[in-house]
Amino acid sequence: MKAPFPSVLLFLGLTALAPAAAPDWRNETYVSRDAAKARVAGQVARLVVPEDPAKPDGTKIELALMRLPATTATPGAPIVYLHGGPGGAGAEHLDNPDFRALFAALQTQGDVILFDQRGCGQSKPSFIPHPPPRPEPDLLASRERLLDFLARTSVAVRDRAVQAGHDPHLYTVPQSVADLEAIRRALGAERIHLFAHSYGTQLAQAFMRAHPSSVARAVLVGSRGMDTARKLPAEADAFLGRIAELARADATVGAKFPDLLATFRRVLAKLDAAPVAVEMECGEKKEPMTFRVGGDALRFIVAKFYLGDPDNFKYLPKLLDELDTGRRPWSLVFNIGTLLRAPISYTWLTTDAASGVTAARAAAIRAQAPTALLREAMNFPFPEINRVWTMSDLGDAFRAPVRTELPTLFVVGSLDGITPVGQTREIMRTFAAARLLVVENGGHNSLFRPAEVPAAIASFYGGRTPPESVRMPPVEFMPLVATR
C-alpha cells in the first residue's frame, strides 16, 4: 500500500517529538581486524530511541554509537557517518585502512560519529542471522534454491524479532531518519554535518528533506537516488562492456580476452546447462563441501562482487578463464566464502522492499532484464522476498527527487558500476548548492585511497572549495594463473 504524501510528511514531522537522552560515553580503543591491527581511540555509547517514532512511550531499541574525537582545538559541527548496505555497520569501516585515513582527515574538522543503523551491527535488536545458517550444497545451483534459502533464513530472523516484541515493519528509511534526528539532539548539536556512502546517501537525502535545519553540510559518496534502489539491467551491461574494453587494452590479460563479453556469455551458457562443482572448506571447522554453482548464481555473484570497484573487477577475467577452461575456480571459492560469512543485517531486505520502485522504472527493468547479461540479478531477491517481510511501499512521494539548497559535495569514482557518474549527475540536478568531485579510475570503495580525496572532503566541511577531479592509477588486471 502506498502512503500518500501528506501522511509521509506528518510521520516525519512526528519524529522530532521523540525523546533522546544524552549518550553516556566511555573510552574504548578499536583494534582493526585487518593485518595492520591498528588501534583507533574513541568513545562508545548506546542511545535508546523509540522503535516507532510516532509512539515515544512504546517499545525501545538501542543504537550503537562510536565517537572519534576531533583533533582540532576549534571543532565544527559533528560529522555523522551514514554507512551503506542497507545492512552494514559503522565501526566495521575502521577495519579498512582507506576509511581509517578518511576518518582521521575528518577529525581535523570535528568529532566523527559512527553509528550502526537500527537492526544493524551492534545495535539492538539485531537483524543479523544468528547463528549463521548452515549452507547447503545446492544453495547456488539455481535462482529458486538461493531464493528459498534467503526466505527460510528471513523467516528465522523475522520470527526472532517478533518474539522479542519488535515490529520488522519499522526498519525502513523514515524510522532511520528519526533515529538520526535523535542522535543530533542527543549530541546537543544545533546542526550536524552528514557524511554518507552508498545506501547511506539515500538516508542522508531523506534526512535533508525531513530536517533541513538540522544539517550544516553534506558529503554524499557513491550516491544512490531516491528511486534507484532497483538497478537498471542495461546499466550493468554497459559497465560490463567498459570492463571488457579495459581488459582488451590490458597488458596482462588483453591477448587472451579480445572480447571478454563473448567469454562471459559462453561461461553463462555452460553454467545454465549444468552447474559447476566448487570444492571448498566451510566454517570454523573447515568442513569440506562441494557447492554446485549455476548460471543465475554466477550472475548474482558478478552483480554483488564485480561491478562496484576496480579492486574487485580486476579479478573478473581470471574468474571467467577458470570457468571457461575447466580449471579449479579459485575466484568462486573466495566469492562464496565471502558470501557465506558476511554478517550483513537483513534490514537490507526490509529497507529495500519498502523503498520500492516507481512504475516507470519497474517497467524499464522488466523490459531490459530478459536480454541483459545479468538478467535481474542486480535486483535479486526482490520483489519475491517481500512475501516473507510484507513491507508496505513508501510511495512515489518518498521516491521523488530531493530538492535542497544545503551545501552538498558529491564524490563518485569514474569506475563505479554500482552508483555510476551519470546517476550522480542526475541526483545533483535538484541540489541548488551542489559540487562534484570525480575520482578518475576510482570505484565504489577505493576512491578514498588518494590522500587528496579525504583532504578535499575535510576542507569542504571547513567551507573551502574542493577540486573537481582527482586521478588514481589505471586498473591492472590480475594474471589468469597466479605467479609463483
Image (cartoon, rainbow, N blue to C red):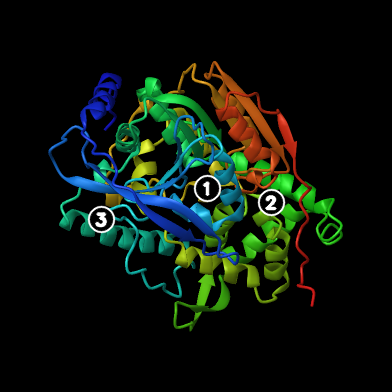
Q: Nearer the viewer, residue 317 or 140?
A: 317
In the orientation shown, which residue stands out farthest toward the front?
73
Mark 3 residue type? Arg
Secondary structure under badge 2? Answer: helix
Name the residue: 34% across, 29% down: 395
Look at label 2 and name its amino acid: Pro
Left or right, 206 with respect to 273, comes to left
Q: Position of residue 399 (x, y in %)?
A: 41, 28
Q: Does residue 77 sit above or below 313 in this rendering?
A: above
**Mark earlier in primary sequence (1, 2):** 2
Mark seen at residue 378: 1
**Left of 176 or right of it: where is 202?**
right
Q: On the image, numbered disc 2 is attached to which residue?
A: 310
User: Which residue in the structure is indicated by mark 3?
Assistant: 158
Q: Could you tell me the amino acid type at mark 1?
A: Met
CA neighbours of label 2 inside 10 A, class few (<14), some (14 to 19), many (20+): many
- Residue 10: x %, y % from top left: 24, 22
